[in-house]
Image (tube, rainbow, N blue to C red):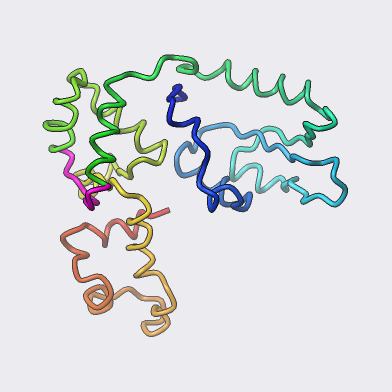
Amino acid sequence: MILHRERDKESLPTEEKWQSLEYWLDTIRRHAPKSPILVVQTHCGEGDKAEARLENEACKTYKIETQIEFDAEFGYNLPLAKKLLTQKLNTLHDYGKKFPKTYEKVISKIENRKNAGETIISYSEFVQTICHKANITKGGEGTLLEYLDKTGLVVHYPNHSVLKKHIYINPDWLTKQVYKLINKNLEETEGKITKEYLEKHLPDYEKLGFLELVKNFG
């Protein structure tokens, strides 16, 4: 699903602009595993360029359909890039639809709570408090939550018996918590995450559902 949202036009933070190709491919696989991928090698007219061509196995892993080289300054492959992007965008069911005002309200409420230091809310609170006050149509909460998860605003596991009760509204914080467990300290336990290890490095693991989260993280 792709919807237009004004705030999405803002520039990315500097640290997010220069991530590796693998980082972005993994991000796509996490949030939209069925999405076809077009890899574009930019600045290809500047001499020594980083080769973006991936092997067949990588293409299958990441569902890469097309790879092209492109240079805006010299117009190299510009018609092809426009054609491929147009073709892909036209296949998206919700592309071009106006971003719902009710979604904006929900996102603002979630971001306000995140900025206030909250990291997790319950699914019932999301439905009964946040969605209800934002006038989300009854029955549409699941579609909205799926959108929030796919766009990386929250992390949610709807099909997991334990984790579906939690909505992690600060993905950056969540990643840091998980990596408190997955680090060099695991050498002490030969890679095994024991109960004692959890209690030492993440005392609130049971309350926050982290044991199941680590199993499903990625």
In the image, residue 116 sits, relative to residue 83, either above or below, namely below
Locate residue 186, reporting x and y percent.
39, 78
Q: Residue at x 29, y 33 (%)?
A: 107
Q: Quadrant of residue 71?
A: top right
With respect to residue 212, does 120 lie above or below? Answer: above
Question: Is residue 135 found left or right of 194 in the rendered image?
Answer: left
Residue 58 vs 178, above or below: the answer is: above
On screen, residue 85 versus residue 151, left or right, reads: right
Q: Which residue is nearer to you in this view: 154 or 61?
A: 154
Q: Residue at x 65, y 18 (%)?
A: 87
Residue extending furthest toward the bottom: 188
Q: Position of residue 96 (x, y in %)?
A: 49, 15
Question: In x, y percent, where is residue 6?
Answer: 44, 25
Q: Residue furthest right?
A: 47
Of residues 69 and 14, the one drawn nearer to the viewer in this rendering:
14
Residue 19 lies in magenta, yes or no?
no
> Is 118 in the magenta?
yes
Q: Residue at x 24, y 44 (%)?
A: 167
Quarter of the view holding residue 152: top left
Which residues are drawn in magenta? 115-123
Res. 156 image quadrant: top left
Of residues 35 and 116, the one nearer the viewer is 116
On screen, residue 180 versus residue 37, left or right, reads: left
Indicate the position of residue 70 as horizontal and vertical percent values.
78, 34
Image quarter (top left, top right, bottom left or bottom right) of the N terminus: top left
